[in-house]
Image (spheres, rainbow, N blue to C red):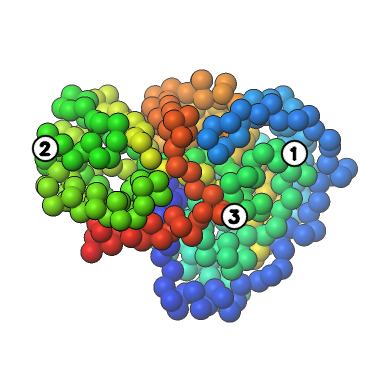
């Protein structure tokens, strides 16, 4: 299911890919002809609550959603006439039929075509551009994973606040990137076997020898620590955790976590429904906003805008994500949405949302557009320390 992934991965473009991207990226704005109907509406101020660097608008569904909803109706009318009502969405994982069905309940005249490309996502988008092939309409990712696409102009400029979205949502990412969810670094634990400390340094205790795992593709887990304590301290911590035998770098964390053979797993949100498993933030854990938007090479930019707004904010869809088990492994909705959204969470969504929101409340390290390159450098350093 597409929604299981984190969209937080390492930058994986080769040097050749970067050259292609630099030479072929368009400065055109795919959404330039799409304006809000009636010039938009004047909205009430955001009833703001700060969650670290994220601003929550408690009055979002009362004072912002009605205008977004109105604009989405107009976007739909445009989208179903563009490219024969075809909407192409590429991501790390393809959209599940169940997710597409929920979208089509409201927008039946749009036919979604989806591909899951994992680490090949960027290169596929570049290749489609260079060969004039049908490209994805929607872009998505975190600031880190979408860095190349951002720098080379693949995100079309969209004035999202003119479509009703609170301006306070655009203090972390670039203005063309619509925040749709959050993810972050967390400790997963088999509570039948062991308890976890409140800090990564606490895992140096001899009681954790052979008890901690991290996936070889997950150096981002240490990046918040590095941003707070410095690169040298982060590298020293990783080195000592490995040399002590406390932490093992593995390919599969899930089975040994669930069995209790390696009862602590450093990673992100939890997808295993085993009732013995829990997840918690730690000091200097990173919380990362995830974004979606419009590809400058889109053939259906209105459809891309419609999908992005629906997936991020539609109240009926968000309620399903928070309460229906078949959608319980989707990423946690954007923390800027009202607290009532998260209060209704159940099952795995409650487990993950509670942990990420607690991390934000405790001052989690949060990536921003201004600090993005520092985060990338820290992830690269952590990757070298973990994997050589």
Q: Are marks 1 and 3 in contact (CB under 8 Å)?
A: no
Q: Is residue 76 visible?
A: no
Q: Tell me if mark 2 has few (under 14), some (14-19) or many (20+) residues whose alpha carbon lies within 10 angstroms of its own.
A: few
Residue 68 placement, left or right of 152: right
Q: Please give the label number shown on residue 206.
A: 2
Q: Position of residue 342 (x, y in %)?
A: 51, 25
Q: Nearer the viewer, mark 2 or mark 1?
A: 2
- Dot 3 corresponds to which residue? 138
**Residue lying at 74% horizontally and 50% vertically, measured from the top left:** 159
**Residue lying at 54% horizontally and 32% vertically, measured from the top left:** 51
Q: Position of residue 83 (x, y in %)?
A: 69, 60
Residue 297 placement, left or right of 356: right
Q: Are marks 3 and 2 in contact (CB under 8 Å)?
A: no
Tell me where residue 329 sits by quadrant.
top left
> Which type of secondary structure does the marked residue at label 1 adopt?
loop
Distance from disc 1 to disc 3, alpha carbons, whole Å, reads: 20 Å
Q: Give 38 or 42, whichever is nearer the viewer.
A: 42
**Residue lying at 84% horizontally and 35% vertically, measured from the top left:** 42
Q: Position of residue 213 (x, y in %)?
A: 21, 44
Q: Is residue 378 visible?
A: yes
Q: Nearer the viewer, mark 3 or mark 2?
A: 2
Q: Quadrant of the C terminus?
A: bottom left
Q: Please give the label number shown on residue 164.
A: 1
Q: How many marks?
A: 3
Furthest toward the right, the residue is: 38
Q: Earlier in the sequence, mark 3 or mark 2?
A: 3
Residue 322 placement, left or right of 214: right
**Residue lying at 13% horizontally and 52% vertically, measured from the top left:** 243
Q: Please give the label number shown on residue 298.
A: none
Q: Are marks 2 and 1 in contact (CB under 8 Å)?
A: no
């Amino acid at each position: 299911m597409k929604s299981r992934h984190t969209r937080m991965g390492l930058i994986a473009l080769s040097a050749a890919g970067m050259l292609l991207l630099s030479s072929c990226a368009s400065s055109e704005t795919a959404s330039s002809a799409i304006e809000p109907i009636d010039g938009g509406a004047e909205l009430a101020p955001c009833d703001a609550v700060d969650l670290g660097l994220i601003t929550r608008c408690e009055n979002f569904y009362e004072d912002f959603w009605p205008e977004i909803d109105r604009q989405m109706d107009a976007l739909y009318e445009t989208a179903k006439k563009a490219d024969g009502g075809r909407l192409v969405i590429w991501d790390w994982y393809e959209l599940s039929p169940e997710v597409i069905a929920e979208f089509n309940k409201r927008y039946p005249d749009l036919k979604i075509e989806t591909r899951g490309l994992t680490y090949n996502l960027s290169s596929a988008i570049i290749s489609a551009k260079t060969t004039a092939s049908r490209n994805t309409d929607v872009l998505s990712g975190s600031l880190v994973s979408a860095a190349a696409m951002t720098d080379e102009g693949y995100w079309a400029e969209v004035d999202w606040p003119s479509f009703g979205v609170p301006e306070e949502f655009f203090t972390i990412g670039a203005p063309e990137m619509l925040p749709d969810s959050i993810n972050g670094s967390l400790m997963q634990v088999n509570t039948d076997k062991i308890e976890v400390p409140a800090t990564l340094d606490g895992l140096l205790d001899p009681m954790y020898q052979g008890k901690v795992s991290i996936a070889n593709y997950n150096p981002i887990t240490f990046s918040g620590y590095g941003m707070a304590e410095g690169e040298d301290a982060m590298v020293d911590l990783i080195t000592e955790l490995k040399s002590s035998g406390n932490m093992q770098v593995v390919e599969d964390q899930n089975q040994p976590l669930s069995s209790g053979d390696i009862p602590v797993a450093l990673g992100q949100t939890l997808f295993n429904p085993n009732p013995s498993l829990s997840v918690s933030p730690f000091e200097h854990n990173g919380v990362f906003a995830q974004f979606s938007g419009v590809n400058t090479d889109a053939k259906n930019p209105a459809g891309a805008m419609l999908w992005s707004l629906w997936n991020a904010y539609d109240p009926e869809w968000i309620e399903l994500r928070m309460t229906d088990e078949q959608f319980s492994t989707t990423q946690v909705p954007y923390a800027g949405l009202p607290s009532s959204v998260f209060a209704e969470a159940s099952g795995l969504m409650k487990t993950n949302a509670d942990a990420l929101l607690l991390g934000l409340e405790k001052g989690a390290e949060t990536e921003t557009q201004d600090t993005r390159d520092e985060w990338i450098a820290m992830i690269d350093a952590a990757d070298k320390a973990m994997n050589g």
